[in-house]
Image (cartoon, coloured by chain):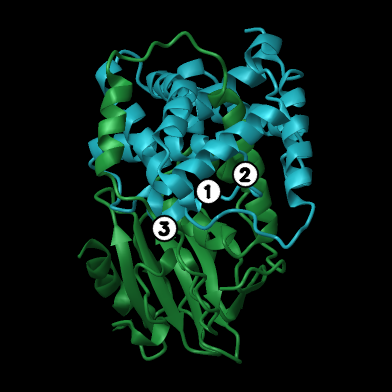
Chain colours: A green, B cyan
């Protein structure tokens, strides 16, 4: 996705601070990176927060280096292959952020989406043993997402299209955090299917009458 | 901790020298340049690892080697007009340390730092970017001296000891909110917040 400066919702300074210091779980880091890559403002802030880290890193210290360590390093580099700078990838119309190329090499259409309802499908990127899961969520243009309640923290980064809920309108690049047990009901905008990157700490619970029928399926998917 | 002694501003000549070494590594696989960088940075990398895991000396030695090899391998990717050599090397050390300790933590996901931290450099088409960044760096370095002991302590625990905000709160026996506002206040003194209310 090309960098744009129109993001309205950003990770807060403390989140970027933790990201710059490397103290954040890499699953959450993937969501932050997907936003930062599209947001000039946050990219700049990240660079500054890394500079703060560098100031501490460069403090003089009394640490001694083991004998033979340099010889060992020299030996190692003689066997190591140097990385050549990659040629600039031609800009395509694809809105996939570079950090997600590993999982989405050929655009969203080529993914093996799993259908949840006629209007909603998902694609799982990764999950850890604690139960944190990162997935893509695709909602048909104009579709109501079912009312849902989170049983854990949820992060959403909008990759394509836009959606709105009781609190506002969110568009490409926006980074949203919802805490446990907030209840909300987003609607995808009419002009385009909405694709989001989502991180879930616990399974979503649907709260609408018909949707309740889907709960066991979603939970199953979450623990699968 | 006294602030004035531990952060001497590197002069431009020194930064220029390090940039030349990185270029020599990238272009000519220059081992002498590598050796110079080793002398400068190996102690920093080791101290950085020991700050998170005091006592793990052999682990720290391993990390030194790993980061130095990364410097060798990635010297061609270093963009001298965007970051200073020391900031770039700090990010390599940070990533290597994260991956090191991540491997030991079975709860962590399989996403590596290479997956998330690449491509996040500020590449705005700004002719004065380099000068502007030097200015900001100077500002941050100076402002660090104006932080209180408490503020320096929390920031150092986050960056050097690699502790999450809640780990810092546990260790200092402070409410998480106190730690967070202390960090926010410190960062705003450094001029690196995005105009958020405190």
Q: In the figure, is residue B118 to the left or right of B141? A: left
Q: Is residue A115 visible?
A: no
Disc 3 secondary structure class: loop
Q: Is residue A28 visible?
A: yes
Name the residue beneath numbered marker 2. Answer: B83
Label 2 close to label 1 by CB (< 8 Å): yes
Disc 1 secondary structure class: loop
Q: Callout 2 environment at 10 Å: few (<14), some (14 to 19), or many (20+)?
A: some
Q: Comparing marks 2 and 1, which lies closer to the viewer?
A: 1
Name the residue beneath numbered marker 1. Answer: B78
Q: Chain of mark 3?
A: A
Residue B141 location in percent, x, y? Answer: 71, 26
Q: Decide: is A132 above or below B176.
A: below
Determine the residue positioned at 55% across, 71% down. A158
Q: Decide: is A9 above or below B145.
A: below
Determine the residue positioned at 38% across, 35% down. B67
Q: In the figure, is residue A66 to the left or right of B151? A: left
């Amino acid at each position: 996705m090309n960098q744009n400066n129109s993001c309205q919702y950003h990770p807060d300074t403390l989140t970027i601070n933790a990201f710059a210091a490397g103290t954040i779980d890499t699953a959450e880091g993937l969501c932050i990176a997907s936003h930062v890559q599209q947001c000039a403002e946050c990219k700049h802030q990240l660079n500054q927060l890394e500079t703060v880290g560098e100031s501490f890193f460069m403090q003089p210290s009394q640490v001694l280096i083991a004998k033979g360590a340099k010889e060992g390093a020299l030996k190692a580099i003689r066997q190591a292959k140097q990385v050549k700078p990659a040629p600039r990838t031609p800009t395509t119309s694809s809105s996939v952020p570079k950090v997600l190329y590993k999982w989405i090499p050929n655009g969203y259409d080529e993914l093996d989406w799993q259908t949840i309802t006629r209007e909603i499908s998902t694609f799982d990127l990764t999950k850890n043993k604690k139960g944190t899961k990162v997935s893509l969520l695709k909602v048909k243009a104009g579709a109501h997402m079912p009312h849902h309640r989170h049983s854990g923290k949820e992060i959403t980064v909008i990759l394509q299209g836009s959606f709105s809920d009781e609190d506002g309108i969110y568009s490409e690049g926006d980074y949203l955090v919802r805490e446990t047990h907030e209840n909300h009901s987003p609607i995808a905008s009419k002009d385009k299917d909405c694709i989001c990157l989502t991180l879930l700490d616990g399974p979503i619970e649907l709260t609408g009458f018909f949707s309740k029928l889907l709960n066991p399926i979603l939970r199953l998917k979450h623990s699968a | 901790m006294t602030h004035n002694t531990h952060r001497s501003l590197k002069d431009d000549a020194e930064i220029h020298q390090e940039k030349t070494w990185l270029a020599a590594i990238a272009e000519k696989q220059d081992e002498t340049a590598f050796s110079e960088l080793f002398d400068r940075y190996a102690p920093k990398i080791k101290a950085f690892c020991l700050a998170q895991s005091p006592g793990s000396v052999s682990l720290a030695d391993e990390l030194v080697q790993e980061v130095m090899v990364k410097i060798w391998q990635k010297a061609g990717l270093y963009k001298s007009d965007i970051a200073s050599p020391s900031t770039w090397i700090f990010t390599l050390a940070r990533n290597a340390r994260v991956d090191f300790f991540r491997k030991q933590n079975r709860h962590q996901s399989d996403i590596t730092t290479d997956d998330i931290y690449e491509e996040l450099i500020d590449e705005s088409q700004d002719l004065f970017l380099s000068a502007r960044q030097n200015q900001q760096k100077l500002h941050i370095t100076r402002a660090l001296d104006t932080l209180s002991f408490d503020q320096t302590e929390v920031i150092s625990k986050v960056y050097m000891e690699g502790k999450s905000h809640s780990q810092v709160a546990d260790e200092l026996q402070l409410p998480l909110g106190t730690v967070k506002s202390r960090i926010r206040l410190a960062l705003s003194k450094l001029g690196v917040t995005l105009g958020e209310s405190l």
